[in-house]
Image: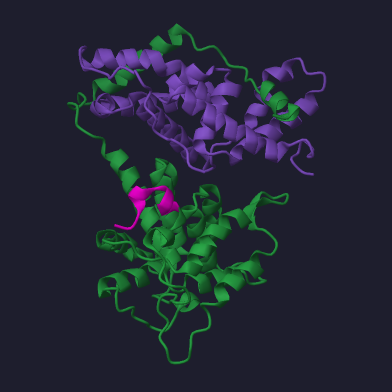
Chain colours: A purple, B green
């Protein structure tokens, strides 16, 4: 399936150099830091590693700040840099692709679950199924459902339009349904 | 939407430890300390090379797949995929390229991984281009490494798996024949050069053998995620259908060189272009 990978937000202001580079960069950092750390935490599973990865990402963004500013889509560019850093950190640590599985133990629903074992089983099945999504689909689903952001917030984080958020959500949901559908057990088997 | 998936997703919220303004400020201080020793950022530069690389990779992948698929031996190679034992890596490679051209990218990736895992460098290179085109640089680098690793582990060129008698098509210049041959042999080190040559030589639409066109139309519908394992396996009857489609090209008259498929009148240009080329005119030959 083909997806739109670089849809610039219409009406997004081009980044100018009215402020000196460090001020614009600081503003950018202030704006993005929290979302990026939460994203990194989801894959790296602890705050310390997430901070390291995001420090590293912003360092790279600072060093290529000219590219960021002159890009058609600075948000998208920055997101990609960040994502790659998270992947790099994961590879350096344990040579596995980014796995969400451990987050099954970190779900809000688990806190008050009547059947904690059942809840963990369900969460693991869902997170495991999400491995089959494309990168774009995964990012959008993580931000939307695991982090609870709305379409505009997801669009801002990724540097895409709200419409470009809805499409992967649809496809991903369809895909997940086919893996976890009603005629299957929660382990994903018939 | 069935209730099931909506419910699962509604229960998927993570507990997030708050990230406060203090945390942000502390991070900024760390960053400034770290960057104090680095040079100031360079002045803004025009268009980002990375985007061009991604587009180039996508173009190269398209070229490579078209080449693999339209090669005269493509169908006989695909046939090796359908043996009762495990599918042969080159056959899986051809299937992957067909799927890529038919925009079934996830399935393409699966079969390339299969072939690459079995040591097929062309498939490994396809994966490199595939990830590069998607901007997935970590993955791309990894597959580039794999290609080189496979390459160095191979004995010197051996094309026995999809060899054919050395037939030269009159209309194809030597450089292109060499490039075509290089692309589908085990020697993936010639791939970048081959792709440049092919890209430069695509000056007019090349008619796709009608049979290959039929295979291209048929395969994506027939290969879907079936069964419990989510493998992109061909549907039952796939083998028979492909054999029916391919048997017309596998019976050359004795003594006559096998050129392009002549069973049908030379198709009109638009009718003979690869399916995806119809959908993306900018990626047509020429």
Rendered view: B242 above or below A65:
below
Taking the magenta stretch, the answer to whether it contains residue B64 is no
Rendered view: A122 above or below B120:
above
Q: Quadrant of residue A22?
A: top left
Q: Quadrant of residue A183?
A: top right
**Span shown in magenta:** B276-286
Q: Is residue B86 visible?
A: no
Q: Position of residue B280 (x, y in %)?
A: 39, 48
Residue situated in front as seen by the camera: A24 or B81: B81
Q: Is residue A174 visible?
A: yes
Rendered view: B223 above or below B42:
below
Residue at the image point whose x is 47% and y is 38% from the top: A3
Residue extending farthest to the left is B43
Q: Position of residue A150 (x, y in %)?
A: 54, 17
Residue at the image point whose x is 38% and y is 69% from the top: B187
Q: Position of residue B3 (x, y in %)?
A: 74, 26
Residue extending farthest to the top is B21
Total labels drawn: 0
Residue situated in front as seen by the camera: A168 or B262: B262
Residue extending farthest to the bottom is B255
Q: Is residue A154 left or right of residue B4?
A: left
Residue at the image point whose x is 35% and y is 65% from the top: B206
């Amino acid at each position: 399936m083909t997806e739109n990978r670089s849809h610039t937000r219409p009406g997004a202001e081009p980044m100018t150099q009215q402020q000196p580079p460090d001020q614009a960069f600081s503003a950018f950092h202030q704006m993005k830091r929290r979302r990026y750390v939460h994203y990194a935490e989801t894959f790296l599973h602890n705050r310390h590693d997430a901070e390291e990865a995001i420090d590293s990402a912003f360092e790279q963004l600072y060093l290529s700040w000219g590219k960021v500013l002159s890009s058609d889509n600075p948000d998208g560019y920055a997101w990609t840099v960040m994502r790659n850093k998270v992947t790099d950190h994961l590879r350096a640590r344990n040579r596995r692709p980014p796995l969400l599985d451990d987050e099954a133990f970190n779900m809000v629903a688990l806190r008050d679950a009547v059947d904690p074992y059942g809840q963990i089983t369900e969460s693991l099945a869902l997170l495991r199924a999400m491995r089959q999504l494309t990168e774009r689909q995964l990012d959008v689903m993580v931000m939307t459902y695991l982090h609870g952001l709305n379409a505009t917030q997801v669009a801002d984080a990724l540097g895409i339009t709200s419409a470009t958020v809805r499409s992967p959500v649809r496809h991903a949901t369809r895909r997940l349904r086919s893996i976890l559908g009603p005629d299957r057990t929660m382990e994903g088997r018939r | 939407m069935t209730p099931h998936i909506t419910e699962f997703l509604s229960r998927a919220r993570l507990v997030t430890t708050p990230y406060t303004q203090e945390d942000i400020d502390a991070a900024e201080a760390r960053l400034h300390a770290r960057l104090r020793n680095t040079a100031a950022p360079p002045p803004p530069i025009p268009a980002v090379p990375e985007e061009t690389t991604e587009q180039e990779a996508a173009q190269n992948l398209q070229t490579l797949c078209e080449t693999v698929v339209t090669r005269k031996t493509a169908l006989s190679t695909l046939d090796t995929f359908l043996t009762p034992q495990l599918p042969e890596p080159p056959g899986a490679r051809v299937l992957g390229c067909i799927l890529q051209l038919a925009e079934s990218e996830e399935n393409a990736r699966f079969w390339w991984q299969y072939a690459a895992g079995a040591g097929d460098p062309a498939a490994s290179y396809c994966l490199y281009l595939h990830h590069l085109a998607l901007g997935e640089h970590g993955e791309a680098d990894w597959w580039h490494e794999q290609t080189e690793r496979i390459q160095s582990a191979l004995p010197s060129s051996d094309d026995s798996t999809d060899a054919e008698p050395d037939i030269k098509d009159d209309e194809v210049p030597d450089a292109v024949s060499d490039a075509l041959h290089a692309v589908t042999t085990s020697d993936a080190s010639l791939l970048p050069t081959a792709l440049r040559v092919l890209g430069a030589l695509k000056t007019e639409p090349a008619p796709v053998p009608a049979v290959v066109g039929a295979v291209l139309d048929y395969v994506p519908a027939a290969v879907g995620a079936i069964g419990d394992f989510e493998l992109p396996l061909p549907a039952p009857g796939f083998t028979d259908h492909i054999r029916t489609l391919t048997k017309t090209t596998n019976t050359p008259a004795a003594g006559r060189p096998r050129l392009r498929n002549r069973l049908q009148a030379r198709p009109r240009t638009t009718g003979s272009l690869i399916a995806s080329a119809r959908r993306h005119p900018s990626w047509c030959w020429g």
